[in-house]
Image (cartoon, rainbow, N blue to C red):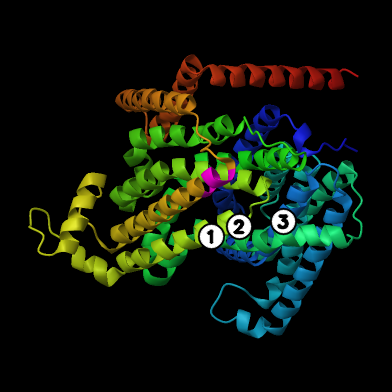
Amino acid sequence: MVTRRSGDELNLLDSSLRTVPGTLVSSGLYAISGVVYAVGAGPAAAGRYLFVTLALGLLVRPVTGVARTLQKRGSERGTDVGAYFGLALSTGVGYVAGLALLGWVTLPVLGRGSLFTAALFLPAVAAGATAVLSDTVKALLGAVGYPSYQSWLGGAEQAIRLSTVVVFAAVIDSAAALLWLTVVVRLLTNVPAAVLVGVVPSVPGREELRRAWSFTQWSVVDQVIDKVAYNMPVYVLGVVGTPVAVGVYEAADRFADFGATVAFALSSPLLTKVSGDWSAGRTEYAYLDAMVTGGTGGTFLVLAYVLANAERVARLAFPEAVAAFSATILLVGAVNVLRAGWTLATHALEGVDRPGTGVVTKVVGLAVAVPPTALLARPALAAGWLVPVGAVPTSPAQTVATTLASVLGAGVPGPAATGALAGALGYVTMNLVVSVGVAAYTYRVFGWLPFDARVAGAFLLGGAAAFFASAATAAVTTTLGGGGALAASTGALAALFVYLLVVAAVSPAARVVVVRAVELSRDRVRATYAALGR
């Protein structure tokens, strides 16, 4: 059983540092999971499994909003965590039961024209139920003051699931088997975690219900909108674009999104901390500037690496669409600096009981970005943009397309290239709109913009140095006979090393973080050694 800490008792620096390693593990495993499933269970089974899990992820998203309420209200000083835990569990059970009933009634329809079959119904229901359990337990960890454990729990789920697929590939050879494996792994990891926390779910009273509703009514909508906003280009391209355009955009987006993923993970301890301080009556959040700006550090590193190696990575990941892939990861990688910032800022606003900010800004961002994305992604329109090399554009659309393609290095735009670029431009537009809206709301609530110019300057210097180091290292590797994969890998290591070195050298705040990270690592090694020696 762990000792409960309200959010105001949380050491934000320590919690953030403990969050990052787990995030790196879970994100890295997630990046290779599709390949592992395809190799272990076969491409057909993997495709069907991924389709079902993505669909379930969207269907159970409203329950994630209820789980967020558990973390927010539970982290406040003097609250009954058990009441909010019980509310989250009972809501999740009722919601999944309703979905299962609806699925059973519409099962004949679901099986027509999709990858879903009747044989997947039971494992899909179980997978949906355990997805709700996983979200609830992770929120419980944040509620009792241990948000860093969320990333480690997610990493453990990924590691056990993928290693089991590799070891038992001869047995796990269908989508149903993969779903049942997911169910078992979630139960084996989340149930013990919930028991170790030691919080007993209880029946919420009228006051808990009132306070839960005041946050949940916005949080549920925000979680659904957030899922739609994050995948907006894929949804739009899937409807009006081409399959190749979807593949190019999604592959580039996953690659360029690594830094923003780290920022999202760091937003959880920030939510817990701000929520606790707000409930304790504190109005000065001195750590916001450094936390919101510092949490974007990973995006600067990714952008530097992408600028130096976009074409090289594109030839490895999508050799049939190198130019479009390169341009897409450049656009997505650049705007993710802003995405990371507004993600952290919106979680801080949720901490002071302003959950509606994310809903309003994302709805406006979608309203502005979806129409041009759908228009530009249409293959018929893209065909009209084709301008042979050396020819003179004869319309404003051709002029814009040719100029943009030239600037981004995308060559002559075709249907696939313009579709991927349309998705990237839509993503950029949406994030620009959301960033402006969040900045305005943040200033209105806190009275200032959480931005540390010195930390941002250190990231810029580190990014510039990482760019040159990565480009030079990859070039030398290629000259010495190394292949594209080796050059990309050595370039990544060089970028990481130089970035950390420069940022630590020019930023006193970064040096404090590095020193504390070393201390925590040393303490962990000592504790592990002492435990093994008993």
1 and 2 marks in contact (CB < 8 Å): yes
Q: Is residue 41 visible?
A: yes
For residue 412, above or below residue 62: above
Magenta-tinted stretch: 441-445
Q: Main secondary structure of the magenta part?
A: helix
Residue drawn at (45%, 23%), measured in percent from left and top? 458
First reached walking from the N terminus: tag 3 or tag 1: 3
Q: Nearer the viewer, residue 260 or 478?
A: 260
Residue 511 at x, y = what percent?
56, 17
Residue under the image location 88 percent in, 49 percent down = 80
Q: Is residue 32 magenta?
A: no
Q: Position of residue 346 (x, y in %)?
A: 58, 47
* SS class, disc 1: helix
Q: Which is more foreground, mark 3 or mark 1?
A: 1
Q: Residues under labels 3 and 1: Cα distance?
A: 34 Å
Numbered disc 2: secondary structure: helix
The x and y percentages for residue 32 are 55, 46
Disc ID at residue 182:
3
- Give yes or no for residue 443 being in the magenta stretch: yes
**Quadrant of the image for the N terminus?**
top right
Q: Amino acid at mark 1?
A: Val
Label 3: few (<14), some or many (≥20) within 10 Å? many
Compared to 38, does 195 lie above or below?
A: above
In the image, which is nearer the foreground, mark 3 or mark 2? 2
Amino acid found under the numbered disc labelled 2: Gly
Height in image: 102 above or below 444? below
Residue at position x 60%, y 36% in the image: 24
| Mark linked to residue 356 | 2
Q: Which image quarter holds the C terminus?
A: top right
* Label 1: few (<14), some (14–19) or many (≥20) C-alpha neighbours in 10 Å: some
Q: Which residue is mark 1?
A: 360
| 130 with respect to 262 (left or right) | right
